[in-house]
Image (cartoon, grey):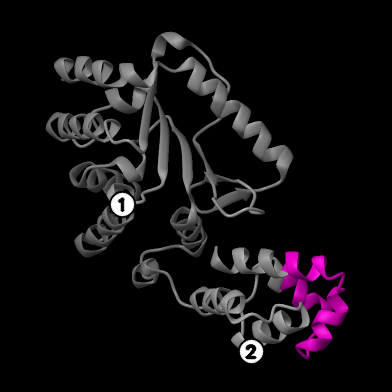
């Protein structure tokens, strides 16, 4: 994500000066295709290359160069989740980078409580269900990864999380009734945080626009970065950023929020379900 951000800033600087990718490539002893890959965030950055490009683009003031050079250094540093590489598929590492950089996440789930809102016991049950052959150590590491992801959302300056859950999610006693009771109590507590909005789509709502499956929309504070739609599958994931695709999912999400019960009804609905357990 940092490479994408830096690449977008370099592209804006280049275009503002009317410099072609061929000219920029020549300056760093590379090709125009290398510049294109850099601007798309698809390759790593050498600080020397970034420094030479900034000079070419007329960025001379130290106070303007320093943040971009520091960004180049950080973009080449593995994220905190790198230590979980033994249990992380490469396609999910991409998502973690996006999640870490996002200022707003809007997610819809119809089977499980989202990972960012799971209790430890509930997370154990989900991991055991998806990785039935995993060792106890691997299960613990996967659960710890979810716990580490959650910390950012209860820290100062936390991003906004807006989750819409199908009623089936909160009625299915995954892990047993005691585990589910604690999970529902946790959802009630999380819904009271200022940066968390939680809505439930009741069974009585009938069909709705997102009947196809769960998805997450990630939005970033940095100007010039498009929203990304994340669709997870059993063995891979899709990342959509074309405006037409994003607009379609955004409309579906907005319709879900209209169909779902109001956020201020969430605690009452979950308390009622708790009484039935």
Q: Which residue lies furthest to the top in this view?
A: 204
> In this figure, which residue is indicated by the disc labeled 1?
156
* Secondary structure that dominates the magenta span: helix
Q: Does the magenta stretch include residue 192?
A: no
Relative to 147, 251 lies left or right: right
- Location of the N terminus (image quadrant): bottom right
Question: Quadrant location of the C terminus?
Answer: top left
Residue 81 occupies which quadrant of the picture?
Answer: bottom left
Q: Where is residue 156 in the image (x, y as percent from the top left)?
A: 31, 52
Magenta stretch in the rendered image:
11-37
Foreground of the two, 180 or 22: 22
Q: Which residue is drawn at 54% across and 51% down?
A: 221
Determine the secondary structure under disc 1.
loop
Q: Which residue is drawn at 32% across and 16% down?
A: 265
Magenta stretch holds residue 22? yes
**Residue shown at the point (39%, 71%) measured from the top left:** 82
């Amino acid at each position: 994500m940092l490479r994408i951000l830096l690449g977008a800033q370099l592209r804006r600087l280049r275009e503002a000066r009317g410099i072609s990718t061929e000219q920029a490539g020549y300056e760093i002893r590379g090709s125009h295709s290398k510049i294109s890959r850099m601007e798309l965030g698809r390759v790593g950055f050498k600080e020397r290359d970034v420094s030479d490009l900034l000079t070419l683009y007329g960025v001379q003031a130290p106070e303007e160069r320093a943040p971009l050079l520091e960004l180049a250094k950080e973009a080449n540093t593995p994220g905190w989740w790198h230590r979980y590489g033994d249990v992380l598929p490469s396609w999910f590492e991409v998502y973690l980078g996006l999640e870490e950089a996002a200022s707003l996440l809007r997610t819809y789930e119809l089977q499980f409580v989202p990972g960012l809102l799971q209790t430890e016991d509930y997370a154990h049950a989900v991991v055991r269900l998806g990785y039935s052959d995993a060792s106890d150590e691997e299960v613990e590491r996967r659960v710890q990864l979810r716990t580490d992801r959650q910390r950012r959302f209860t820290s100062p300056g936390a991003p906004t999380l807006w989750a819409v859950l199908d009623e089936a999610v909160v009625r299915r006693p995954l892990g047993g009734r005691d585990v589910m009771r604690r999970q529902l109590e946790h959802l009630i507590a999380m819904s009271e945080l200022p940066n968390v909005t939680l809505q439930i789509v009741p069974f009585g709502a009938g069909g709705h626009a997102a009947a196809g499956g769960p998805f997450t929309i990630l939005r970033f504070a940095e100007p010039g970065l498009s929203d990304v739609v994340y669709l997870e599958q059993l063995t891979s994931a899709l990342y959509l950023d074309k405006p037409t695709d994003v607009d379609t999912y955004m409309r579906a999400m907005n319709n879900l929020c209209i169909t779902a019960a109001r956020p201020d009804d969430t605690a009452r609905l979950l308390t009622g379900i708790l009484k039935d357990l």
